[in-house]
Amino acid sequence: MQTEPILRVEGLRTTFSGDEGTAVAVDDVSFDVNAGEIVGLIGESGSGKSVTALAIMGLLPKDTARVTAERILFDGHDLVRASEREMRRLRGRAIGMIFQEPMSSLNPVLKIGDQLIEPIRIHERISHRAAFDRGVELLSKVGIPSPIQRMNDYPHQLSGGMRQRVMIAIALSCSPKLLLADEPTTALDVTIQAQLLDLLLEIQSETKMAIVLITHSMGVIAECADKVVVMYSGRIAEQGPVTEIFDRPGHPYTKGLMQCTPELTGNPRRLTTIPGSLPSLSALPPGCRFAPRCGLALPTCEAGRPPMIGLRGTHASACIRADELVAAAAQPEEADA
Amino acid sequence: MLAYTLRRIAQAVPILLLVSLISFGIMQLVPGDPAAVLAGPNATPDELVHLRQTLGLDKSLLTQIMIFYGNLFQGDLGYSIILGEPVLKVVIERSPISISLAIYSLILTIVFGLFIGVVAAMKHNRWIDQVAMAFALIGVSVPNFWLGLVMIVLFSVHLGWLPTGGYVPFFEDPIGWFLAATMPALSLALMQIGLLARLTRSTMLEVLGQDYIRTARAKGASEPRVIIKHAMSNVLIPVVTVLGMILSVLLSGSVIVETIFAVPGIGALLGNAILGRDYPMIQGGLIFVAAVLLILNIAVDVLYAWLDPRVRVQ
């Protein structure tokens, strides 16, 4: 069942220039998002996940950031070459976005209602009354009690979880085809996190919009996503269907991420950590960027950038030992022994 | 909102009482005999006795306070020694002059201060920003009496565009008022324009980096909409707080500027009263200026609460 992708990112590269020279935050990133699909974008802090999302939205600061790509195709538009005016018409209407910090993402001096119906008023010719009614409907859809009263509240009167629900309602207000969710639950309590993920999944199954879900939690990916893109230090380490990657990880970094996530079922085991930390963007290793932290690294790993190796189906990994890893994962008992 | 306003007004009453007590104390703080100081070295003993009686200085301190407050609550601020007229009458005659001047310079401050600050922030680190901030620095550094004199030399003496000073009532001749008030208002406002422009610029830069501005852009909002609706509503909060202080500087700064431009306002009146040791006039003027400043500050606080919903809760 191969459908035309709604979002196709090809060769995305983002650099930031500052006083200390230029840093490449995202380097040659390509992935597809099909209509109605949830794609998880996972990686450590600083791996370039958020920058990727902001580059797609065209929301990176123009004076310091430079975004290039072969193309970023979204629904017939090439977002890299689109004019600012064209981008404005897509933002909030065809592409919605949710941010990590619900506490600071809403304007403190404007009423919830005004902020919620703003995209509707910007993108649609509709009366204030009708927009207000739709706002009330949206608030009750995202599970906010007494929505009519809440429309007249200010953000400081709402809890973090409620504010993130409002952010979701804002992102959904014009029924976008694509939702970019940048760590939507990271700043919230664990119990609220699960509620919000369930809410997102419920809305997604209803509206069939595509979601790019940025997270650093393998658990969230396992629960929500159809496809995973694993990013490391601005590059894609591995991508493929969720089941494939969880069963047969083809990159030592993915494997490391999974081993440092506790399992609630099965035998308790000692959690492992990945030694070291992300390389500095100003001092990147010449070859595979994970090589200095990798237990399986060979001398050739440090020589040049490893190519993407195609595995089964759409599964691909940027590791020269990907085939070995996948084969080892097929016989886990033997490999562990 | 109404409860908040009433509470602020109630808080002003003790402040006003304290100010009036201090202004009463001025008479007591004069070293030696105030009557002797007032009457001068050539006064006869009879004149001194008479002066003490008119000023009530022959009575006990407590009685003096009672009489002072008794008169105050009846709106009687005493008689000016120099002008020989009731202080309240003089103050009411002169205050519209100073207040119209202060409002004119406040408008100049808000319009130019906000405009320069916002433009500088939007063109951050470009030449417009640097020119604007250089101007603001000059504005902050130039003393208003010097600026006033330079403007008189340039615009009145050399170019002959504006009168050197004086005052024309606004409702009699608006154009004449405008011509006469522009230089005094400008010399009062320039420093405040500089301060406000710098504050506006730094606040705007901070606000533009906030997450909610990114949210507004992610909604597809146009740049004017982001600046006016989302950024300005937040920038105005600290700006309004400072407006209260700016107003008091504009009113009290008028002592020097009114003297330079021969504007017969409260500032010049108080200045002359101090030079002529007209104590009832100084007392009355002080109480009046304090009352005006209190009212203005209450207005600023109410405006502040209206702008920032988080303040209203408390």
Image (tube, grey):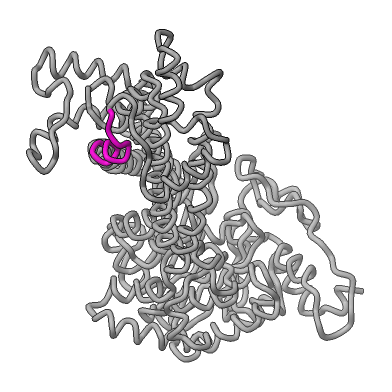
Q: Which residues are magenta?
A: B84-94
The residue located at (43%, 79%) in the rendering is A151
The one nearer the camera, B52 or B104, is B52
The residue located at (36%, 44%) in the rendering is B76
Does the magenta run of residues contain A152? no
Q: Is residue B217 above or below residue A194?
A: above
Q: Residue furthest front?
A: B46
**Where is residue A138, by image quadrant?**
bottom left
Main secondary-structure element of the magenta-colored stretch: helix
The one nearer the camera, A210 or A193, is A193
Report the number of discs.
Answer: 0
Q: Residue furthest top?
A: B42
The residue located at (42%, 77%) in the rendering is A152
- In the picture, the quarter occupied by the C terminus of chain B is bottom right
**Where is residue A333, by image quadrant?**
bottom right
* Residue B138 in the image, given as x and y percentages of width and height: 36, 23
Question: Would residue A33 appear left or right of A123 to someone viewing this image?
Answer: right
Q: Is residue B146 visible?
A: yes
The residue located at (50%, 90%) in the rendering is A205
Q: Residue furthest bottom?
A: A206
The one nearer the camera, A226 or A154, is A154
Question: Would residue A27 appear left or right of A260 to someone viewing this image?
Answer: left
Q: Is residue A32 visible?
A: no
Does the magenta run of residues contain B87? yes
* Residue A319 in the image, given as x and y percentages of width and height: 67, 61
* Residue B267 in the image, given as x and y percentages of width and height: 32, 30
The one nearer the camera, A328 or A18, is A18
Q: Residue furthest right?
A: A337
* Residue B310 in the image, given as x and y percentages of width and height: 51, 64
- In the picture, the quarter occupied by the N terminus of chain B is bottom left
